[in-house]
């Protein structure tokens, strides 16, 4: 089954999917390493503070980082610095999408997290509040919050026959769950 929705539909949005690392701690050395590629700033360590930073940097390559009681904003200094790190076999344009920068530049190249196994090493969360709660409860040690990508960006990537990293395209609204189809022959009635 498939659901077709025009990209121009005003109600169509792609929600962000934040990444939480369960075993990896952000150290001072890690922050220093991030500072070589990103402008790092301390931000208010609250849901409102994280959302405010992301909203203010919506059209930039920026991330909010939350670790118990502390939060930082990361803003990419130069797009060109990404190309030396990104291992994705993709076009030059695709290499500068935020989730690719997050996985290939921040996780693999700078913080050296290694391969991250879903549900073991990395968790995914849609809402900022739930993301903060998971770090505060100890379920994860650090969270990287992202801005959503646009539906147009998803189309551009698909048009180039490329794929986005997992948990990148959370389209909303979704079809009602439990929806099904059944073939009814002529003259047949449902009781």
Image (cartoon, rainbow, N blue to C red):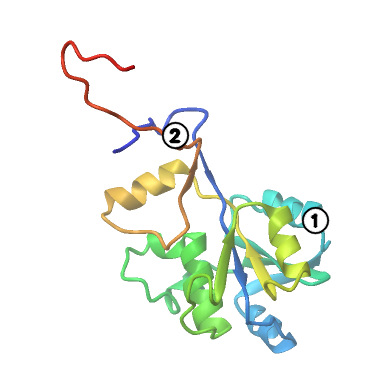
Q: Nearer the viewer, residue 128 or 38?
A: 128
Q: Position of residue 39 (x, y in %)?
A: 68, 71
The residue positioned 35% from the left and 48% from the top of the image is 156
Q: Position of residue 82 (x, y in %)?
A: 48, 72
35 left or right, relative to 160? right
The residue positioned 30% from the left and 29% from the top of the image is 181
73 left or right, relative to 155? right
66 left or right, relative to 8? right
Q: Residue furthest front?
A: 191
Dot 1 and dot 2 residues touching (CB under 8 Å): no
Assign a secondary structure to mark 1.
helix
Residue located beneath label 2 in the image: 175
Task: State the CA–CA distance, disc 1 to disc 2.
Answer: 32 Å
Q: Nearer the viewer, residue 64 or 129?
A: 129
Residue 134 higher or lower than 186, as above or below: below
Q: Nearer the viewer, residue 170 or 49?
A: 170
Residue located beneath label 1 in the image: 49
């Amino acid at each position: 089954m498939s659901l077709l929705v025009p990209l121009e539909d005003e109600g169509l949005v792609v929600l962000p999917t934040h990444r939480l690392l369960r075993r990896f701690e952000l150290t001072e050395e890690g922050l220093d390493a991030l500072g070589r590629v990103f402008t790092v700033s301390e931000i208010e360590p609250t849901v409102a503070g994280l959302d405010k930073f992301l909203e203010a940097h919506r059209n930039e390559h920026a991330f909010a980082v939350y670790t118990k009681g502390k939060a930082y904003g990361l803003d990419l200094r130069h797009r060109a610095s990404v190309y030396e790190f990104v291992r994705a076999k993709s076009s030059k344009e695709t290499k500068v999408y935020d989730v690719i920068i997050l996985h290939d530049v921040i996780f693999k190249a700078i913080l050296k997290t290694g391969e991250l196994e879903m549900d073991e090493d990395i968790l995914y969360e849609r809402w900022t509040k739930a993301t903060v709660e998971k770090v505060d409860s100890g379920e994860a040690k650090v969270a990287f919050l992202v801005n959503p990508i646009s539906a147009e960006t998803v189309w551009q990537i698909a048009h180039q026959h490329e794929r986005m990293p997992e948990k990148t395209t959370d389209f909303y609204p979704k079809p009602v769950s439990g929806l099904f189809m059944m073939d009814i022959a002529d003259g047949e009635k449902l009781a």
